Every structure is written in C-alpha cells, then in structure tokens.
Amino acid sequence: MKIMKSIKKFVADDSGISAVEYALLLALIGAGIAAAAFALGERVTTNITDATTALQG
C-alpha cells in the first residue's frame, strides 16, 4: 500500500509542469528563429547573386 501512495503522490505532483512548459516554449521560439534565419539567408544570397550579375553585365 505504501507503494501505491507513492505512485499516486508522484502522479499528482505538478511542480515540474512549469519547467516543461518553459522548455517547450523555448524550443518553439528557437525553431521559429532558425526557420526565419534560414529563409532570410536564402533571400540575402539571392540578392547578392542578383547584384553581382547586374554589376558584371
């Protein structure tokens, strides 16, 4: 019976939930920043290529 009480107490404990929520939030923000940087990098590369072509022509 003591094991069952320990399991119930462990399941009912929600003190770690806020840390998990912050970790998920940071992961989502990081993924968004990475996607934006990747998209911006492609545009910068395209603009530099276009400018180089225009200067050579």
Image (cartoon, rainbow, N blue to C red):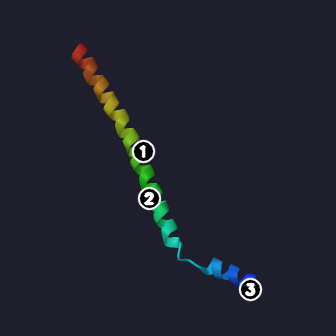
Position in image of residue 50 (x %, y %): 29, 23
Q: Are marks 3 and 1 in contact (CB under 8 Å)?
A: no
Q: Secondary structure at mark 2?
A: helix
Residue indicated by mark 1: 35
Image quadrant containing the C terminus: top left
Q: Nearer the viewer, residue 11 or 43?
A: 11
Is the Cβ of the residue at disc 3 closer than 8 Å to that at disc 2? Answer: no
Q: Earlier in the sequence, mark 2 or mark 1?
A: 2
Residue at horizontal 24%, vertical 14%? 56
Q: Is residue 10 left or right of residue 4?
A: left
Q: Secondary structure at mark 1?
A: helix
Q: Position of residue 5 (x, y in %)?
A: 70, 85
Mark 3 against mark 2, which lies toward the viewer?
3
Between 23 and 39, which is closer to the camera in this rendering?
Answer: 23
Can you tell which mark lies on residue 25? none
Q: CA distance from mark 3 to mark 2?
A: 38 Å
- Is 54 rendered above or below residue 8? above
**Badge 2 is on which residue?**
26
Three-letter amino acid code at the position of disc 3 = Lys
Residue visible at 40% across and 39% down in the picture:
38
Query: Which percent across, then down, holds residue 49?
Result: 31, 23
The residue under label 1 is which amino acid type? Answer: Ala
Whichever of callouts 3 and 2 sits on the residue coming sooner in the sequence is 3
Q: Which residue is mark 3?
A: 2
